[in-house]
C-alpha cells in the first residue's frame, strides 16, 4: 500500500535536546485523503507535521513526496515545493496583518506569478465559497476568529495545492464556528482533490477525516488503509 | 417512557386518530425506528386508563374510528415531564471499565482494548458526521447530540490510557 502514498514518512527520528520528539514515526498519506493525527499533548504531532511539510528535517528517516526525497533536497527546492504543492492552516496568526483578507488569499497566487486582477478575482471567489465574502476588504484583525480561520482555509487552498497541512485549525474556536470551518474546509479540499493532514486533539474534528493515526511518544499507530 | 410522553404531547395540538398519531410521531421523532401500530394502541390504552387521554368516538366501528384527545391531567403530565431534568447517566460501572480492569487483572493488553475502542468510536463519529453534513438541521442536531456524547467517551478513553500504569498498580493483587 505504501507505493500508493503521495506523501510518506518512514521511520523518522528527531530529538530536541533530551526529548525524543519523533522516535521511529511513519505515516502514509494518499492523494485526496484526509488523515487526522491525534494523540496526547507533547506526543510529537506538530513535529511530525513539520517534517512531512519539509519545515523541519528529521535526524534520520525519509520523507517522500510524489516519489521525491524531501530530506535530500536543497532548502530552495524544499521551499519551492512548499509554495507550489502545499497549503497550510494553523491555529492562529498565519495571515499577514497589514494586508486585507482578500489580499491575503490572493498572495499565494501573486507569488506564483498570477496577475493582480486575476488573483483578486479568484481570491474573491474563494472567500465567497468559504462564506466570508463580506470580510474581503477588512484586515485579519478586524475579522472574528472563525472568519479569520475561513480566510486562512481559503488562502491554503487557493493555489490548488495537493496537500494541505492543518495544525489545530479550530483550536481557538467554539464548537459552532469550529464546525463551520471544518465543514467548509473538508468540502473544499474534497472538491479540489487536495489531501489533508489534520492535527487535532478533538475527536469531533477528527471525525471529518477519512481515517486517523494516533501519535504516542513519537511513534505513530496508523489505522489500516481503509476505504 | 419518552415515547408515551411524546405521543401524549403530540395530542396537545388537537385530537388525532391512532394511525395519524403514529405517522406524526414517525415524521417528528422516528428517524431511525418507526413505531408499531400496536405500540401506539397499547400506549393509548394505558393513557386512557390513567385519565391522560379520552376518546372521541365517531360513527362506525373499528379502532380507527377512535380519536384520542389529551385531558387536562395529560397536559399537566407532559408539562412536568418536559420541565424535569433528566438524571445524568453515570458510566462508572460501564462495560468498558470492566473490560479494562479485567484485561489488567488477567495480564492482557489493556491499552489495546482502549485503542480499538477509540477506533470504533471514531468510526461511528465519522458516520454521524457524514450523515449530518448530508442532512437537514434536524439531522444535524440529532447527530451532534450523539457526537458530543461519543466525544465524552473518547476523552475518558484517552485519560484512562494515560493512567493505565496507575490503574494497573491499583487493581493488581
Ligand atoms: N523547538 C523545540 N524545542 C524544544 N523542544 C521541542 C520543540 N518542539 C517540540 N519540542 C518537544 O518535542 C515534543 C513533541 O512536541 P510537539 O509539538 O510535536 O507535540 P504535539 O503532539 O504537537 O503537542 P500539542 O498537542 O501540545 O501541540 C514535546 O516534548 C515538545 O516539548
Ligand atoms: Mg502541536
Image (cartoon, coloured by chain):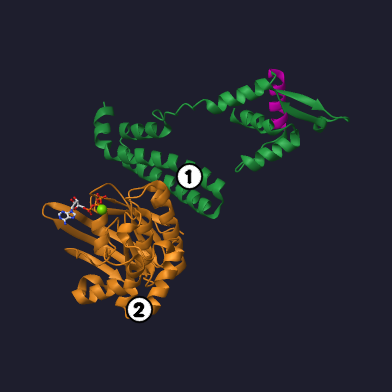
Chain colours: A orange, B green
Instruction: Label the magenta part by its dominant secondary structure.
Output: helix
* Residue B109 drawn at (x, y percent): 32, 40
Within 10 Å of disc 2 (Cα), the crowding (few <14, some 14-19, many 20+) is few
Considering every residue shown, the one lying at the far left of the view is A17
- Residue lying at 39% horizontally and 45% vertically, measured from the top left: B118
Identify the subunit bearing mark 2: A
Q: Is residue B115 something that shows in the picture?
A: yes
In this rendering, the answer to whether B68 lies above or below A134 is: above
The tag on residue A116 is 2
Label 2: element kind: helix
Identify the subunit bearing mark 1: B
In this rendering, the answer to whether A187 lies above or below B83 is: below
In this rendering, the answer to whether B103 lies above or below A49 is: above
Q: Is residue A206 magenta?
A: no
The tag on residue B144 is 1
Give the Cα distance between marks 1 and 2.
42 Å
In this rendering, the answer to whether B126 lies above or below A98 is: above
- Residue lying at 28% horizontally and 62% vertically, measured from the top left: A94
The tag on residue A136 is none
* Residue A90 drawn at (x, y percent): 30, 58
Task: Give, as a single range, the part of the protein colored magenta.
Answer: B38-50
Amino acid at each position: 500500500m505504501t507505493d500508493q502514498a503521495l506523501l510518506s514518512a518512514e521511520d523518522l527520528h528527531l530529538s530536541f535536546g533530551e526529548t525524543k520528539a519523533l522516535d521511529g514515526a511513519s505515516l502514509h498519506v494518499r492523494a485526496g485523503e484526509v488523515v487526522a493525527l491525534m494523540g496526547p499533548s507533547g506526543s510529537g504531532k506538530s513535529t511530525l507535521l513539520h517534517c512531512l511539510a519539509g519545515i523541519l528535517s528529521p535526524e534520520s528517516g525519509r520523507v517522500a513526496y510524489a516519489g521525491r526525497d524531501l530530506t535530500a533536497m536543497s532548502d530552495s527546492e524544499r521551499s519551492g515545493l512548499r509554495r507550489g504543492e502545499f497549503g497550510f492552516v494553523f491555529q492562529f496568526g498565519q495571515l499577514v496583518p497589514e494586508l486585507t483578507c482578500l489580499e491575503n488569499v490572493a498572495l499565494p497566487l501573486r507569488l506564483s506569478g498570477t496577475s493582480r486582477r486575476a488573483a483578486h478575482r479568484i481570491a474573491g471567489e474563494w472567500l465567497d465559497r468559504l462564506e466570508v465574502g463580506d470580510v474581503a476588504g477588512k484586515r485579519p484583525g478586524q475579522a472574528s476568529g472563525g472568519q479569520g480561520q475561513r480566510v486562512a482555509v481559503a488562502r491554503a487552498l487557493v493555489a490548488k495545492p495537493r496537500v494541505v497541512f492543518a495544525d489545530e485549525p479550530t483550536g481557538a474556536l467554539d464548537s459552532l464556528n469550529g464546525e463551520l470551518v471544518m465543514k467548509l474546509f473538508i468540502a473544499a479540499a474534497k472538491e479540489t482533490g487536495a489531501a489533508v493532514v489534520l492535527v487535532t486533539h478533538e475527536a469531533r474534528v477528527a471525525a471529518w477525516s477519512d481515517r486517523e493515526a494516533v501519535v504516542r511518544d513519537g511513534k505513530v499507530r496508523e489505522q489500516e488503509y481503509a476505504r | 417512557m419518552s415515547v408515551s410522553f411524546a405521543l401524549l404531547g403530540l395530542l396537545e395540538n388537537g385530537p388525532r386518530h391512532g394511525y395519524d398519531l403514529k405517522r406524526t410521531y414517525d415524521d417528528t421523532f422516528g428517524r431511525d425506528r418507526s413505531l408499531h401500530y400496536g405500540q401506539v394502541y397499547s400506549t393509548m390504552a394505558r393513557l386512557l386508563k390513567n385519565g391522560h387521554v379520552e376518546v372521541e368516538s365517531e360513527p362506525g366501528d373499528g379502532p380507527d374510528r377512535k380519536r384520542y384527545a389529551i385531558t387536562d391531567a395529560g397536559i399537566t403530565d407532559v408539562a412536568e415531564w418536559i420541565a424535569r431534568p433528566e438524571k445524568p447517566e453515570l458510566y462508572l460501572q460501564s462495560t468498558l471499565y470492566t473490560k479494562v480492569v479485567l484485561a489488567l487483572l488477567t495480564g492482557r493488553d489493556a491499552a489495546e482494548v482502549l485503542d480499538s475502542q477509540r477506533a470504533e468510536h471514531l468510526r461511528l463519529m465519522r458516520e454521524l458526521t457524514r450523515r449530518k453534513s448530508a442532512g437537514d438541521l434536524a439531522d444535524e442536531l440529532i447527530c451532534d447530540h450523539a457526537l458530543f456524547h461519543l466525544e465524552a467517551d473518547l476523552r475518558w478513553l484517552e485519560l484512562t490510557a494515560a493512567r493505565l500504569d496507575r490503574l494497573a498498580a491499583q487493581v493488581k493483587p
